[in-house]
Amino acid sequence: MLEQCRSDGTSFSDRLIPGHCLQNGSYRLEMQFDGNFVLYSGSRACWASGTDGTNEVYAKFSGDWKPDSPYMTLESPVGELRKYRGKYTGLHKTGNVSLNNKGEVWIAYGKMAGC
């Protein structure tokens, strides 16, 4: 039986910590306790970060006019494990990490992954 994650809605603009997830319909983007960041369609994993086996991993969004932004990192006490870049359009310089009802993960206006 799968443990249920605590849903933080369909987006985050700061951090997603272990045991929390984004949910939209049958899709779920979960920051797991084992350190892996996984996109699910129902019970099937569609995409994973490959960071399992690392303790205390969390996802962090960085944007809002910062250099190199927008991006999402997977971080742990030992440092940055992965960095995924998004994009802005025109004058839209704010954003978040979101999961839409098609199973697509977006960093601001750039698609990162999908089922």
Image (tube, rainbow, N blue to C red):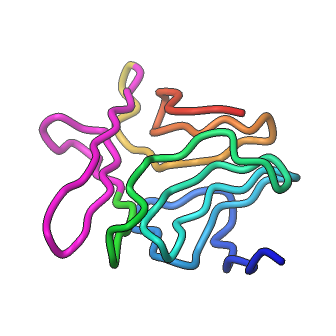
Identity of the residue furthest to the front in this view: 53
Q: What stretch is highlighted in magenta?
A: 61-89
Residue 105's x, y, as percent? 59, 39
Point 28% across, 51% down: residue = 62
Give the tally of numbered discs: 0
Residue 1's x, y, as percent? 84, 77
Q: Does the magenta stretch include residue 72?
A: yes
Identity of the residue furthest to the top in this view: 90
- Residue 4, compared with residue 37, is above or below; it is below
Point 80% across, 41% down: residue = 101
Point 39% across, 61% down: residue = 59
- Residue 27, compared with residue 112, is above or below; it is below
The one of 71 and 75 positioned closer to us in this rendering: 75
- Residue 56, compared with residue 112, is above or below; it is below
Which quarter of the rendering shows the C terminus? top right
Q: Does the magenta stretch include residue 4?
A: no
Residue 86's x, y, as percent? 38, 32
Point 34% across, 38% down: residue = 84
82 left or right, relative to 35? left
- Residue 98, compared with residue 14, is above or below; it is above
The one of 52 and 63 positioned closer to us in this rendering: 52
79 left or right, relative to 5? left
Residue 38's x, y, as percent? 58, 53
